[in-house]
Amino acid sequence: MRKRTIGIAAAAMLLLVGCSTTSTQADQVAVHYQGGPIQAKAFADCVAPASRDYSSIGDTYYVYPASQRNWVFGGGNADTGAITFVTSDGIEMSVTGVGNFTLNTDCKTLQAFHETIGNRYNASFDGSNASEGWINMLQVYIAQPLETAIDRAGQQFTYQQLYFDPAAKAVWETSVVELLPELVGRQTEGDAEYFKNFQITLQKPEPPASIKEALVAQQAAVAKANAAKAEADAQVAAAQAQVAVEAAEAAQIAQKIAVLGVDGYLKQEAINNNLNPFQPTVPLVTANVK
């Protein structure tokens, strides 16, 4: 009996060792293909997120992401450099940002994606990490359409609108999102929508260094001119205020003269300034000359 139990356990172990298996994480799916040593490879089914699947020896699993993925352009740890585009007034701008998307994990669509694109690029994931093939695939099917969308949308604005006007920049960003699905779809075969749920975040686009330097110089000149104008306006205002004060004083003097007369006004002014307007008079003495 003991020998029989050991034999059954050994057979079970051999069966498990000979099986193909996969274990998907919570943000992964897998496509499963059957095919033994003498069988043609054929699609079997899809493996849902957070699942473990066992199959016959020779079967193969290809793991793909089920969560949101992104393509970062420009900045630290980016997938590629900043994207350049040309505005309606012919200025080449550069922009950094990130494009987000999800892979369509509907089973039939995922199978089609694997067979037409994923398998060709070796794009399935290596455990939890994106493979080099996945990055190479995104260069073609996401990055290039994204660059085209940014350039086409950017041609509707001048560089000053995109650089200075947040509202224009927001419209440009929305236009990129609207253009992207069609441009991505042109890269794929057939009508299947392999990528969806696009979101784009674009940073403030930057003009060439020469234009930025010119803008700084222009702003400095404007600031200097504004300061000079403010000083001149202040001087004019001060002069006008002084004229108004003098006019008011003259009006007061005229009113006093009208009441007191010139002589009375002068005497009053002398009194106000601690002077005595009433000096004693000395009779004129005429000497007799003999």
Image (spheres, rainbow, N blue to C red):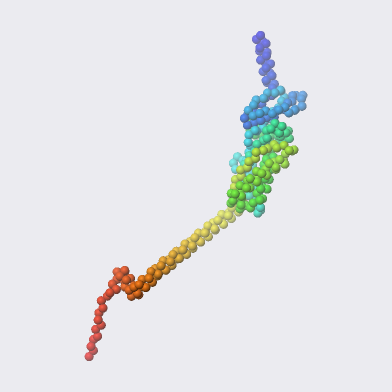
The mark total stands at: 0
Question: 223 above or below 129?
Answer: below
In the figure, 246 relative to 145: above or below?
A: below
The answer to whether residue 236 is left or right of residue 259 is right
Q: Quadrant of the C terminus?
A: bottom left
- Residue at 68% x, 30% y is 30
Between 126 and 155, which is closer to the camera in this rendering? 155
Residue 262 is situated, as x and y percent measured from the top left of the image, at 35, 75
Residue lying at the far top of the rendered structure = 1
Residue 139 appears in view: no
Front-most of residues 222 and 248: 248
Residue 71 image position (x, y, % from top left): 64, 40
What percent of the width, then of the height, locates residue 76? 59, 41
Vertical placement of residue 10 versus 184, above or below: above
Q: Residue at x 43, y 67 (%)?
A: 243
Figure quadrant of residue 1 = top right
Which residue, as the protein is rendered here, is positioned at the far bottom?
290
